[in-house]
Amino acid sequence: MFKRILVPIDGSATSNLGLQQAILLAKDQKATLLPLHVVDESPLIHSAMASGSIFTDLMNSLTENGKKILLKAEGLARQKRVRTRTTLVEHSLGPVADAILKQAKKLRADLIVIGTHGRRGGARLIMGSDAENVVRQSTVPVLLIRSKTRAAPRRRKK
């Protein structure tokens, strides 16, 4: 059913859960796994401190870290005998979700698997939600993998 499964990863425990599920699904579907790491430049661009060589050094560090994350993902997939095609992109403007959706289209993904913290309320507003934006805008199915650390339950109104 699925031939190309995109899984955005950032090295966090939550994205690693998404990666693990995507690997299992890719193995079951005999699909190609498409691990994606987005190097988000926007915090650096908006920081007055990140100028000139400092910006370059920080970007190089973020890029190298992204490459390590992708290599680890590729190794995990290989252990399960899953084909992979990794992608690293630098993204400077707009939400990271935009870069994820652009790559999903470019790589012709037919499923996106993404880890999510499942935050609600103020925490979600402050932190933003790339997963939510992907779900809202994606033209292909999206499988959300919830973090093992659950968000606080909603209180019922009396």
Image (cartoon, helix red, strand yellow):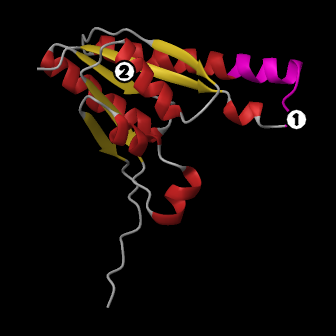
**Residue at the spot of label 1:** 49
Within-10-Å neighbours for mark 1: few <14, some 14–19, many 20+: few
Q: With respect to residue 45, does 84 lie above or below?
A: above
From this viewpoint, which residue is outermost toward the left?
1
Relative image position of residue 113 (x, y in whole percent): 31, 31
Q: With respect to residue 14, does 96 lie above or below?
A: above
- Which residue lies at the image location 32% right of the left edge and 91% below the top edge? 158
Within-10-Å neighbours for mark 2: few <14, some 14–19, many 20+: many
Magenta region includes residue 60: yes
Q: Is mark 1 on a helix, strand or loop?
A: loop
Residue 47's quadrant in the figure? Answer: top right
User: Is 24 positioned to the left or the right of 1 in the image?
Assistant: right
Magenta region includes residue 47: no
Query: Disc number at residue 104?
Result: 2
Residue 31's quadrant in the figure? Answer: top left
Does residue 77 appear in the picture of this structure? yes
Residue stretch rendered in magenta on the structure: 48-61
Relative image position of residue 82 (x, y in whole percent): 25, 12
Relative image position of residue 154 (x, y in whole percent): 36, 73
Foreground tag (2 vs 1): 2
Q: Distance between the residues labelled 2 and 1?
A: 33 Å
- Which residue lies at the image location 72% right of the left edge and 16% below the top edge? 60
Q: What element carries label 2?
A: helix
Does residue 75 appear in the picture of this structure? no
Residue 138's quadrant in the figure? Answer: top left
Question: Residue flagged by tag 1: what amino acid is it?
Answer: Met
Q: With respect to residue 149, does 21 lie above or below?
A: above
Question: Residue flagged by tag 2: what amino acid is it?
Answer: Ala
Relative image position of residue 123 (x, y in whole percent): 53, 60
From this viewpoint, which residue is outermost toward the bottom?
158
User: Is 20 positioned to the left or the right of 49 in the image?
Assistant: left
